[in-house]
Amino acid sequence: MDIRYKALAVHLLTASGAVLSMFAMLAAVEENWSLMFSWLVVALIVDGIDGPLARRYDTVTNSPLYDGVLMDLIVDYLTYVFIPAYALFKSGMLDGWTGWLAIIVICYGSVIYFSDTRMKTKDKSFSGFPACWNMVVLVLFATTPPTWVVLIIVVGLTIGMFLNLKFIHPTRTKRWHWLNLSMAVAWLVFAAWSAVVDFHEGPFVEWGLIVSSLYLCLAGIAQELFPDRSSDRIA
């Protein structure tokens, strides 16, 4: 197949995330959280695949009529931010003013973060929490912590979007690449299982979600605290 058609197919794959987000939103309106998160997990898998494919087939050169980065950001805002924020509010996990505060800071802070030209570091990691609210809210649904814990997590991560803290990109951060990727895949498996069984996943999967989530959140910070000195060695 002509590489131009392969590049175009990658754009079409990215665009399918908009359809998946609509399916997730329809499920959310019906308060079918299991189905909503199932669609969001599928959208997350698509998002994890389209980036490497875009680089492999060089979509910028071979299919320049469509801006894959812009398309990806549009889809990501729907699936990473807007729908999870709606679910957090509508589920009643945060009542009254706490729910309103959560959706305001999540939606407002995330759109500013997504437009920040400094969001990527030199090693293709993220500078600040990368607004992965789909992952955060799924874990909150699975673990059902107290309201005050949920509020602290939401406010803390929102502030974290604008702090100079490193968060790994599971497929692009080179340091600890296979461990990062393995943890991301493990998180996807645990998340998919939790969604399919309507968050009656049991302690093993619940702890798997917690441990893999903590790794994905803290690995980048650990890399900054313990920098790789191998490049400084003289052969």
Image (spheres, rainbow, N blue to C red):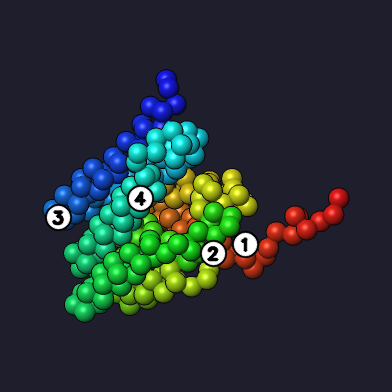
Q: Which mark is residue 119?
A: none
Horizontal side, residue 33 vs residue 10: left or right: left
Whole-number angstrom distance, CA of label 4 to CA of label 3: 27 Å
- Residue for badge 4: 70
Q: Looking at the image, is mark 1 or mark 2 nearer the viewer?
A: 2
Q: Which amino acid type corresponds to the residue marked 1 in the rendered image?
A: Gln
Disc 1 vs disc 2: Cβ atoms closer than 8 Å? yes
Whole-number angstrom distance, CA of label 2 to CA of label 4: 23 Å
Whole-number angstrom distance, CA of label 1 to CA of label 4: 29 Å
Q: Which mark is residue 223?
A: 1
Whole-number angstrom distance, CA of label 3 to CA of label 1: 40 Å
Disc 3 vs disc 2: Cβ atoms closer than 8 Å? no
**Tag 3's secondary structure?**
helix
**Residue at point 59%, 45% (across, down):** 178
**3 or 1: tag closer to the N-terminus:** 3
Q: Which amino acid type corresponds to the residue marked 3 in the rendered image?
A: Val
The residue carrying pointer 3 sits among few (fewer than 14), some (14 to 19) or many (20 or more) residues within 10 Å by Cα, namely some
In this rendered view, identify the residue nearer to me: 4 or 189.
Answer: 4
**Residue at point 44%, 33% (across, down):** 62
Q: Which mark is residue 29?
A: 3
Q: Looking at the image, is mark 2 or mark 4 nearer the viewer?
A: 4
> Can residue 188 be seen?
yes
Residue 9 in the image: above or below residue 166: above
Disc 2 vs disc 4: Cβ atoms closer than 8 Å? no
- Residue for badge 2: 166
**Tag 4's secondary structure?**
helix
> Can residue 214 be seen?
no
**1 or 4: tag closer to the N-terminus:** 4
Residue most toward the top? 1
**4 or 3: tag closer to the N-terminus:** 3
**Residue at point 20%, 45% (across, down):** 23
Whole-number angstrom distance, CA of label 1 to CA of label 2: 8 Å
